[in-house]
Image (cartoon, rainbow, N blue to C red):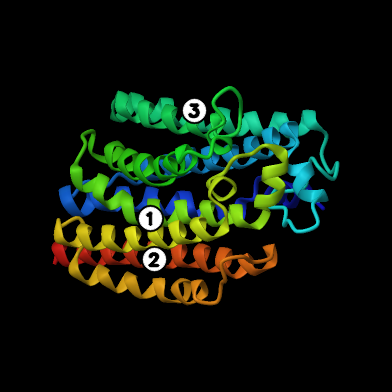
Amino acid sequence: MDALTQFKKASRIKVIPVMLIPVALGALGAYVWTGQFHIGLFLLTLIGSGAAHLFSNMVNDLWDYKNGTDTEAQEHVDAISTNSGFLTKGVWSLRKFELITWSLFGLAAMSGIILSLISGWWAFVFGALGGLIAYFYVAPPIQFGYRGKGFSEIAILLSFGILPVMGAYYVQTSHLDIRALLLSLPIGLLTTLILFNHHFLHWQADRQAGKKTLVVVWGEKRALNFSRVLLLLACLSLIVCVLAGALPPYALIALLTIIPLYLVYGRLKDSNRSEAYLPLMGASTMTTMRCGGVLILSLIIQGIIQTL
């Protein structure tokens, strides 16, 4: 593989839309609600948040490898590994992996500092909180992803919903708005659902490695019920956004994107092999992308209507 292809695989760049979508929503919310939109600030926010997300992916792989979780998942018979494999298979040395990981952090930090100098210190606060959550998700001593008390899910909701949407809005306007918080919930909850559902792929290996996700703590049946609750909360939060004026009424069309994921739940039993959760993961990811796309499109249309 060439260097770029290796980087794409090591950083799992294909999932970067789950970070770029909330950033776009926050910036579009600023345009629709206040008429303010600065393309340069928007692009720098995309670069910084994208780098932060890739850093999060790689630092998670790094610490899961050091903690033995990825090795356990690779060796467990009924487990599907979700890491890049660059450390467990020796594609990159640990030193090279760490160098690229922290280079991404440096790019994200530099972007955050520049944005805070232009838009205000809250931009740095949002970025710093996101960076701390990304690092300590699996890094000691906090390890959100290992505690199994809902800290992991709260961390994801913050990192892929509240912080990027409100941060992108603040960068454009230099102030905060409750509508930005509401707008962050549907996409944030759907992204949380992706990360929650991916634990089903290797929960038994996680248990053996001492990683206490909610799936490990609750077991499959209860965790599946909670997964359905997360989906319901995402739908309800979207409706609240419309009622509160954060989204136009036609944004409710996004609820249709939930249907394929809802149907997947009906095909799952209380206990399943790891492979049975691959369609759930795929449907969760596609639902988040499609729903986010519809919400972005609805805000663009609303912005165009207001300028006519």
Image position of 293 (left or right of 94): left
The residue labelled by disc 1 is 187
Extreme residue toward the right, this view? 90
Q: In this view of the protein, can residue 225 be seen by the observer?
A: yes
Tell me the element at label 2: helix
Q: Position of residue 262 (x, y in %)?
A: 44, 73
- Residue at the image point whose x is 47% and y is 56% from the top: 193
Disc nearer the start of the sequence (1/2)? 1
Q: In this view of the protein, can residue 40 be seen by the observer?
A: no
Q: Position of residue 41 (x, y in %)?
A: 36, 40
The amino acid marked with disc number 1 is Ile
Image position of 190 (left or right of 221): left
Of 165 and 265, nearer the camera is 265
Residue 291, numbered label: 2
Residue 132, numbered label: 3
Image position of 52 (left or right of 183): right
- Residue at the image point whose x is 74% and y is 52% from the top: 5
